[in-house]
Every structure is written in structure tokens, then in C-alpha cells.
Image (cartoon, rainbow, N blue to C red):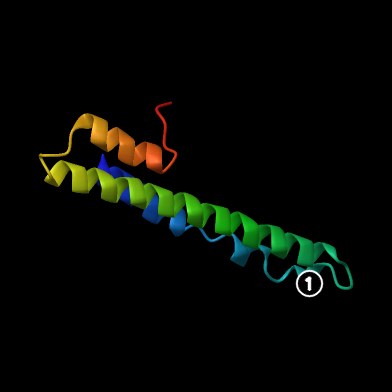
Amino acid sequence: MADKLARVGTEIDDIDVRTGAAGLNAALPGSDIPRAIELAAEFVEGAYLRVAERMRDVANKSTDAANNLQVSDTQFADLLHGMDVHRA
């Protein structure tokens, strides 16, 4: 599970939203739309980064718990609840 979450975190972090939004000034000169799109893309990329960080945090906590046989299921659940992670 930890490896998969870490991999997903990296894949999400690698998504480049801003590049696609860049360069719209040439297509829409004098318009405010390109700047709005660039700003929205920046916010979306920031949200993706936070999701990626969350995936990596859960992966690290999973790995740490797996490597420490003294961590009970309840303690691991408490670690995840501390990150506001709940069972779906």
C-alpha cells in the first residue's frame, strides 16, 4: 500500500497544469481571460501538490507503522485520523 501511495503521490505531483495555460496571451491579446486561466491553473496545480503530499505522508506513516511491530492497528488508525484520513 505504501509503495502504491508514494507512486500515486509522485504521479500527481508530476501533472503539469500551468504549462498548458501559459501562452494564451498570444491567442487572446488584450483580454483578461488568459491571466484568469493562468491563475486558475496555478491554484489547481497547488491543489494537486497538496494531494500528492498527502499521499506521500500516508505512505510514510504506513511504512513507519509496518516497520515498527509495536504499532497497533489502533495507533495506526490514530495516526491517520490525525491527518484527517478516514475510511471510505
Q: At which x and y percent is residue 35?
A: 77, 67
Q: Residue furthest right?
A: 30
Q: At which x and y percent is residue 42?
A: 63, 62
Residue in front for this viewpoint, 25 or 80:
80
Residue density around tag 1, few if under 14, some if 14–19, many if 20 or more, within 10 Å: some
Q: Residue furthest left?
A: 69
In the rendered view, would you say 19 is above or below 11? below
**63 sits to left or right of 33:** left
Q: Dividing the image into 4 quarters, which one contains the C terminus?
A: top left
Q: At which x and y percent is residue 48?
A: 52, 53
Q: Residue furthest top?
A: 88
- Residue at 21% x, 47% y: name it: 63
**65 sits to left or right of 86:** left
Q: At which x and y percent is residue 82?
A: 39, 42
Q: Which residue is mark 1?
A: 25
**3 sits to left or right of 56:** left
- Residue at 20% x, 48% y: name it: 64
In the rendered view, would you say 59 is above or below 25? above
| Tag 1: amino acid | Asn
Residue in front for this viewpoint, 28 or 49:
49
| Residue 83 figure quarter | top left
